[in-house]
Image (cartoon, rainbow, N blue to C red):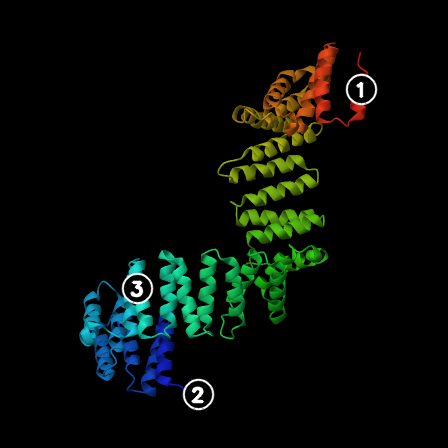
Amino acid sequence: INKADTDKAASYYYLGCISMQEGNLPEATSMFNKGVEANPEYAYNYVGLGAIELANKSPKTAAAQFKQAEKLAKKDLAVYVAVARAYYNADPVAYAEEVEKKMDKVRKSSPNFAPQIADFYMFEGDMAADKSDWGAAAGRYEMATTYDPAATEAYVKGASMYLKINPNYSIQLLKKLLQLNPTSALGQRELADKYYDTKKYKEAVAEYAKYVQNPNHFKQDEDRYAFLLFYSGDFNAGYEFASKLLAENPTNFTAQRYQFMNAAQLPEMKDKLLPMAEALIANHNDTNRFAAIDYILISDELKNAKQYEKAVALLEEGIKEMPDNSQFYKNLAMIYVEQNMIAKAADVYLGYMASLEKATFNDKVQYATFCYYGAIEKKTTDAARSAELFDKATEIANDLAATYTTHPRGYKLLGDIKVQRADQAEVATIAFDEYMKACNVIEASGNAAQYASDAKVVFNYLGNYYLEQNDVETAKIYFYKYLEIDPKNDAYRAFVEGLK
């Protein structure tokens, strides 16, 4: 603003408008007054001062400022549009008549009542957009480009409107802007965003790559580019870009996050992940916050390093921050499994089940399995807890058997539970009914191999049941069913063939 060739009055006006948008009326007033001092003949600073008076609930004083602006406007009809916009911004309902009067003045003062002023159509477009009339808004913004082909804001706003009704044309508008002004940072940014919004991620990344090289790009948009690189799967480029940002500013926490996130996808970075994860934890605070993916990736790295307590603490923090994130519960349960703390895993997995809108077959099987093995874990140390977990496993297994009638897992689990809860003398016979029901489901499928792990347990149990009944021939039937699934088990075959 201090350069000799700068239009100080215009610059102060735009600075005042920015201050108004930010709600800083004293600063805006100061800018507009400086604009008047710089050039008392420049009309727009009086429009700005009038807008301040409207904000201060002084419409008469505002009208006087607007009158002065219009007096100085001479043939610049855009001043009347600026006054109309000031009234509209203050209260579009209360000042509807004033808005229409100013716009009508522009129409009547134009050849054939067709204003040739970009600002006129920009304002009409903004009013239509406020009414969610996207088609009308898009049309008015496009009219603005007719009268000012270099009106960047018109192309950008028009593209935003067309995105809702004609996404491809939205992109074409921004391409046209960049043909006219190839170095427009705003045009590059908006085109990249429109590509992203229309799921053209490769094009979005390419356009953002140009944009972040533009010296006029917004620094905060570098984070968006890092985001796009990661979620488009370009992990090497994402790692390099995040590393570049960190070299420029070592306190850039977002860059640090994306550096780690990308590195976690690159096998060659395996040995560097733990120090990076620990550095993220050290810099994590109320200001430098984690997203869900951070909690997951960092806790995975801590788990891989067998730093279980830290991994657990991090996921518990994640659950506290985002209690609806089901993946946190699932990952936490698996950390307990890795430590052979199955009962604890079952407790955590209950949180996972509660976070789901509807549990799947696999979800239920996993929970029942945790409860089952957790019950076994507690059999000798906490009988009451063991019984509680067996009961829960039984409840889920009954649900599986009733709901998924063409899958043997529910009946097989019920048999497993009965075997584990039985006295030694009852083990060989107590689960016959459950395993036989599982067997019937397996055989009805016509493909026992698809249930190989369940089928082997079932056939083996039934074979031993009939041995217990001294029915060797029937026992062999089930043992040979087992061998059909596991034909290379020579020891098992020798056992069966040795039966008399």
Is residue 330 shown above or below 262? Answer: above
Which of the two labelled residues, at mark 3 and mark 2, occupies the earlier sequence position? 2
Identify the residue at the far top of this view: 470
Residue 126's quadrant in the figure? Answer: bottom left
Mark 3 residue type: Gly
Residue 166: numbered disc: none
Q: Callout 3: helix, strand or loop?
A: helix
Kindly identify which residue carries mark 3: 139
Q: Is residue 182 left or right of residue 298?
A: left
The reply to whether callout 3 and callout 1 are in contact (CB within 8 Å) is no
Q: Secondary structure at mark 1?
A: helix
Q: What residue sits 36% from the left and 60% below the top?
A: 162
Q: Is residue 251 above or below residue 482?
A: below
Q: Residues within 10 Å of mark 3 (few under 14, many from 20)?
A: some
- Do the numbered discs 3 and 2 sit on residues whose CB atoms are within 8 Å? no
Q: Amino acid at mark 1?
A: Phe
Name the amino acid type tagged 2: Lys
Classify mark 2: helix, strand or loop: loop
Which percent across, then down, holds residue 120?
A: 27, 71
Q: Earlier in the sequence, mark 3 or mark 1?
A: 3
Residue hosting label 1: 495
CA distance separating discs 2 and 1? 98 Å
Q: For the point 60% across and 39% down, which residue is it?
A: 348
Of marks 3 and 1, the one in the foreground? 3
Q: Which mark is residue 3?
A: 2
| Res. 207 in view | yes
Image label count: 3
**Tag nearer the camera, 3 or 2:** 3
Crowding around mark 1 (Cα neighbors within 10 Å: few <14, some 14 to 19, many 20+) is few
Please name the residue shown 31% across and 59% down the image. 135
Q: Position of residue 351 (x, y in %)?
A: 55, 39
